[in-house]
Image (cartoon, rainbow, N blue to C red):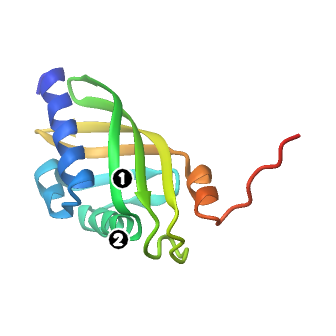
């Protein structure tokens, strides 16, 4: 894929999977040998496990949306800087529902082969998310 085709691919994936909450669409975008690296936990080594994680996220945070703030691509790679929003209406990561609106940002790096995502790295503001949900104390100004 050309860099512009990769940008379209990542934009379509973001829209269909995260904004339309269509976890089954991951089959269109990911290799069955997909590996997911995430700062919040151990690597996910199968597409099915990643789908289960995505389902948990989309269930715990209703009205979940991802806005792409920047997208850079070159053959075989893409980097997406994004902001996610949602409402914590269901249990998420062991945290009982709070009804709070949340917003956090991050960066995802994708490695592509044969028109599929084969590996990705996610870095995002987990501390900010947990603080918004009341699972972490807020910082006190000095």
Which quadrant holds residue 54? Answer: bottom left
Nearest to the observer: residue 77 or residue 99: 99
Q: Which of marks 1 and 2 is nearer the N terminus?
A: 1
**48, 133: nearer the viewer:** 133
Which residue occupies 41% across, 47% down? 84
Q: Is 129 placed above or below 99 here?
A: above
Q: Indicate whether 4 appears above or below 17.
A: above
Residue 90 at x, y percent in the picture: 43, 75
Report the quarter where the N terminus lies.
top left
Q: In which quarter of the image is the C terminus?
A: top right
Residue lying at the far right of the rendered structure: 142
Tell me the residue that label 1 is attached to.
36
Report the residue at 60% width, 50% height from top: 128
Looking at the picture, tell me which residue is in the foreground, 43 or 20: 20
The residue depicted at 83 percent of the width and 42 percent of the height is: 141
Q: What element carries label 1?
A: strand
Q: In this view, does 61 lie to the left or right of 130?
A: left
Instruction: Please state the horizontal and vertical placement of residue 133, each as a whole percent of the image.
Output: 58, 63
Q: In this view, does 28 lie to the left or right of 42?
A: left
Residue marked by disc 2: 59
């Amino acid at each position: 894929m050309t860099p512009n085709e990769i940008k379209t691919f990542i934009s379509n994936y973001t829209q269909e999977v995260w904004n339309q909450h269509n976890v089954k669409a991951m089959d269109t975008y990911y290799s069955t040998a997909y590996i997911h690296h995430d700062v919040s936990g151990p690597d996910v080594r199968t597409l099915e496990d990643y789908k289960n994680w995505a389902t948990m996220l989309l269930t715990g945070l209703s009205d979940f949306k991802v806005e792409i703030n920047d997208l850079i691509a070159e053959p075989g790679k893409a980097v997406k800087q994004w902001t996610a929003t949602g409402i914590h209406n269901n249990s998420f990561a062991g945290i009982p529902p709070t009804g709070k609106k949340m917003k956090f940002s991050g960066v995802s790096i994708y490695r592509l082969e044969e028109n599929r995502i084969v590996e990705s790295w996610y870095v995002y503001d987990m501390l900010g998310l947990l603080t918004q949900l009341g699972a972490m104390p807020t910082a006190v100004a000095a």
